[in-house]
Image: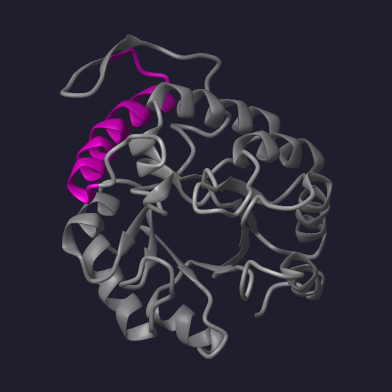
Amino acid sequence: MRYAISLPPAGSPADLIDAAVAADRTGWHGFFLWDHLGADGMPMHDPWVLLGAIGAATGRVRLGAMVTPLARRRPWKVAKEVITLDQLSAGRAVVGVGLGVPETDFTGFGESADPRVRAAALDEALVVLDGLLRGDEVAHDGPLFRVRARLGPGTVQRPRPPIWVAATWPHRRPLDRAARYDGVFALGRDAVGGLTPAQVAEVRAAVGPDREIVVPHDPAVPVDEYADAGVTWLVVGPDTPDGDWLARLRRQIEAGPPA
C-alpha cells in the first residue's frame, strides 16, 4: 500500500511547494492538490500551476489533482496540462477526475450543478481525454465535444498516465465508470469522508482486482485493515482546512507515512 498527501491549494504557494518537497524527502509516495475554484468562500490557487512548480522541485512523489471536475473543463486543455506535468516530473503525473464539489463552483458561474448533467459531461470528456493522452488521432463527435486532433509532445508514461475516477460508495454508476479506467478514488456517501474496510472490500469487488483503490485515511481505522481490504493508496489530508491546518499537516508530513 502506498501513501499520499492531499491538500487544498490554499495559503502561501511557497509553503505548499515546501510541503511537497518535504513529502518527497520523507517517504510519501504521492502529493495531490484539490481542484476547486474556491467559489464557496475559501480562497484557492490553481492546482495545475502549482503542480508544475512542484514537479520541478521534487524527484520521486506522484503528482496530480484530486480531483479535476471534467464537467467544467475542456478535456483537451486538461490533456495539455497533464502532458506538461508528466514531462516536467519525468513521468510522475496521475490524473484524478470526478463530478466535482462544491456545487457553487458550477452555479456561481452559470453552469448546471445537476449531477446527471455533470455525469454525462464527465463520461464524454473522459473518452476524449483518454485518447488525447495516449497520443491518438482522436476523431470524436458527441453531444458536447467535436474533436479532430492529436496532441504532442506525448507523455513520458506509456500508454498514458493513470486515470483515477472519483466514486461515492455505494452508487453503482460511478463505480462502473471507474472500472473502465485505472483506479477509483473512493469516497463515502457525503463525497468527502472515507470508507470502512468492509465498504472498501465492496468497492474492490465492484471495480475489479487490477484497479487502484484510493481512499482517504480515517485515523480511527488501523492501517493494516485498509491494506487487507484491498486499498492500494491511502490518502492523508488536513484534519480541517481552517486555522493553522498546513502547519499541523506539515508535522504529519515530516513524520512520514503512517505505516
Quarter occupied by residue 213: bottom left
Expressed as whole percent of the image width and height from the top left, the position of residue 175 reads 24, 59
Q: Is residue 6 above or below residue 197?
A: above
Q: How many marks?
A: 0
Q: Of 65 and 1, which appears nearest the observer? A: 65
Q: How is the image coloured?
A: one colour
Quarter occupied by residue 200: bottom left
Expressed as whole percent of the image width and height from the top left, the position of residue 162 reads 45, 44
Q: Which residues are magenta?
A: 114-138
Relative to residue 187, is residue 147 drawn left or right? Answer: left
Kindly identify the residue that appears in the image at 52 percent across and 86 percent down: 224
Q: Is residue 49 above or below residue 210?
A: above
Report if residue 73 lies within the magenta region: no
Relative to residue 145, is residue 195 drawn left or right? Answer: right
Q: Is residue 144 above or below residue 110?
A: above
Report if residue 117 lies within the magenta region: yes
Relative to residue 15, is residue 60 drawn left or right? Answer: left
Kindly identify the residue that appears in the image at 61 percent across and 41 percent down: 47
Residue 163 visible somewhere in the drawing: no
Q: Is residue 150 above or below residue 103?
A: above
Quadrant (top left, top right, bottom left, bottom right) of the N terminus: bottom right
Expressed as whole percent of the image width and height from the top left, the position of residue 148 reads 30, 9
The dominant secondary structure in magenta is: helix
Going by the picture, which residue comes out furthest to the top?
A: 148
Quadrant (top left, top right, bottom left, bottom right) of the C terminus: bottom right
Residue 241 visible somewhere in the drawing: yes
Expressed as whole percent of the image width and height from the top left, the position of residue 27 reads 75, 64
Relative to residue 65, is residue 180 drawn left or right? Answer: left
Kindly identify the residue that appears in the image at 32 percent across and 46 percent down: 181
Kindly identify the residue that appears in the image at 39 percent across and 27 percent down: 75
